[in-house]
Image: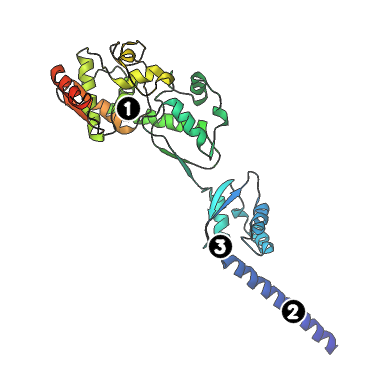
Amino acid sequence: MIKIRSLLGLIVLIAVMAISWAYFSYQQFLHTPIAIQQPLVFEVKSGSGATAVVEQLAQLEVISQPQFGQVFVRLNPELTAIKAGRYALLPEMKITDVFALLTSGQTIQYSFTLVEGINIHQLIAALRTHPELDISALEGLSDAEIIAKVKLSYEHPEGAFFADTYHFPAGYSAIKLLERAHQRLLTVLQQEWQSKADNLPYQRPYDALIMASIIEKETAVEAERPVIAGVFVRRLQKRMRLQTDPTVIYGIGVDFDGNITRKHLRTDTPYNTYTRHGLPPTPIAMVGRAAINAALNPAAGTQLYFVAKGDGSHYFSDTLEEHNKAVRKYQLKK
């Protein structure tokens, strides 16, 4: 009888020790940082469950005791609503931190900068080169098809997307990015329209957008934007042609070889502001807030002309005579 009691006692002792060891090992597993020495990009595929994620972590040798990982996900069902995407795992993370991250949806964010002054074709080309954007829905689309896909408020996609930096997860739809950029443009344009100067020659916000695109192409010098806007506004008010080269170049399209000629200035297109009065029919480039603000708040003054000085800035003149002198000095070097 004594032997039986001793044996039972031994069994109980072994069981208690085993349970204690398992509990201690499990707690150690929970509080030990994952086995990586540098940040790791960890991708959760769509439809992956917590069990599959534990197996994936073990295969990558991020954790060494997957059996404890499986226990953890069973004991913590609130941490198993995992969201697909790419995540940045850090060396100091514990398994609890990993699952908190995977259920938060805080995936790695990539960025795309829509640069001021580019046109729609350059924008589409730039989207195609981004490795983390899904551009399949954009392939081979005409302008009209882009308008339909993105649900644009305008009849032409040129200038319809706000120049800014956009963040998104891996595999993000280029169509969605364009939708965001278009909505951002509409918001900013409306905001700026609310605080516009009086007596501007615009019938609608879209006219200001067209003007902003011309300003964007004429100068990269921030301080000059309102001054150039003032020149163009005064010319419109006086029924003078804008006579701005960027619109002519846009009208030439892909045939432009980088050298604008007198023939180009005389060849009539809807965008030739040397042959036609008023604004061109659409914007000629993508714009940022500064150009929109300049178009709607032009600098006061009397200048009606300007010429590039060759250093990125411009010389402004009140009269044609003064302008011609500036052209001879800065362009013809006479």
Amino acid type, residue under disc 2 in the picture: Ile
Residue 217 - label: 1
Mark 3 is on which residue type?
A: Lys
Counting every numbered tag in the picture gives 3
Colouring of the image? rainbow
Instruction: Give me the residue at 83% from left, 89% from top.
Output: 2
**Residue 212 appears in which quarter of the rendering?**
top left
Left or right position of 177 against 330: right
The Cα atoms of the two marked residues, 2 and 1, are separated by 81 Å
The residue labelled by disc 2 is 14
Could you tell me residue 147's position as x and y percent? Answer: 48, 22
| Residue 300 on image: x %, y % | 16, 26
Circles 3, 1 touching at the beta carbon (< 8 Å): no
Distance, label 3 to label 1, CA atoms, is 52 Å
Q: Earlier in the sequence, mark 3 or mark 2?
A: 2
For the C terminus, the quadrant is top left
In the foreground, 4 or 209: 209
**Nearer-N-terminus badge (2/1):** 2
Residue 94 circle label: 3
At horizontal 59% and vertical 54% (from top left) the residue drawn is 79
| Image position of 276 (left or right of 315) | right
Q: Is residue 271 above or below residue 159?
A: above
